Amino acid sequence: MTTAGISADEAVRALRERTLADIVAATVGRDHVDSHEGFFDAGGDSVLALQVVARAHEAGLALTVRDIFELQTVAALSTRVTEVTAPTGDELPELSKQQLDEFEDFDSPAEPGGSDEWES
C-alpha cells in the first residue's frame, strides 16, 4: 500500500527517523539534528548514548549503545531500530503453585532473631 508515492515501509522508517532525531536533539541539548549528522559530532558522548537508548525505548523503539557507536547517524539508526513490544498477559507463562510458593518464600522477610546469612 502506498500513500502519495510513499510505501508503508518508507512511512514507518520516516516516522522512526523523526522520532530518533527528536530524541537525539533533546538528549544533546539542541533544537534540531540533521539525520545524516554523526551522534558524536552533534555533541553526544557515551553517557548520552545510554540516555538515547533509554528514551528510544520509552518511545517504543529498541536500539543499543553499540548501534549508536557503529551507525552514529539518525538515518542509519532508523534502519536498524525495531519496535519494542511488551508481552501481553496472554503471552506470559503460567506459573505453577510450586513456583508461586517459592517466590513467596523468597520474598518473605527474615524472621526476627533468626540467622541472617548476609550478615558478617
Image: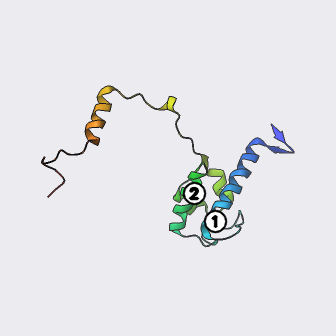
Residue 63 in the image: above or below residue 26: above
Mark 1 near mark 2, Cβ–Cβ under 8 Å?
A: yes
Residue 117 in the image: above or below residue 48: above
Q: Residues within 10 Å of mark 1 (few under 14, many from 20)?
A: some
Image coordinates of residue 7 in percent, x first then y, are 79, 43
Work out how far the residue at label 1 is from the one at label 2, CA to CA, in angstroms: 10 Å
Residue beneath the point at 51% across and 67% down? 46
Image coordinates of residue 57 in percent, x first then y, are 56, 52
- Secondary structure category for the residue under label 2: helix
- Answer left or right for 118 relative to 41: left
Dividing the picture into quarters, in which one does residue 22 lie? bottom right
Residue 55's disc is 2
Front-most of residues 29 and 53? 29
Quadrant of the image containing the N terminus: top right
Residue beneath the point at 26% across and 41% down? 108
Amino acid, disc 1: Ala
Amino acid, disc 2: Arg
Front-most of residues 34 and 111? 111
Front-most of residues 94 and 110? 110
Image coordinates of residue 67 in percent, x first then y, are 56, 57
Residue 26's disc is 1
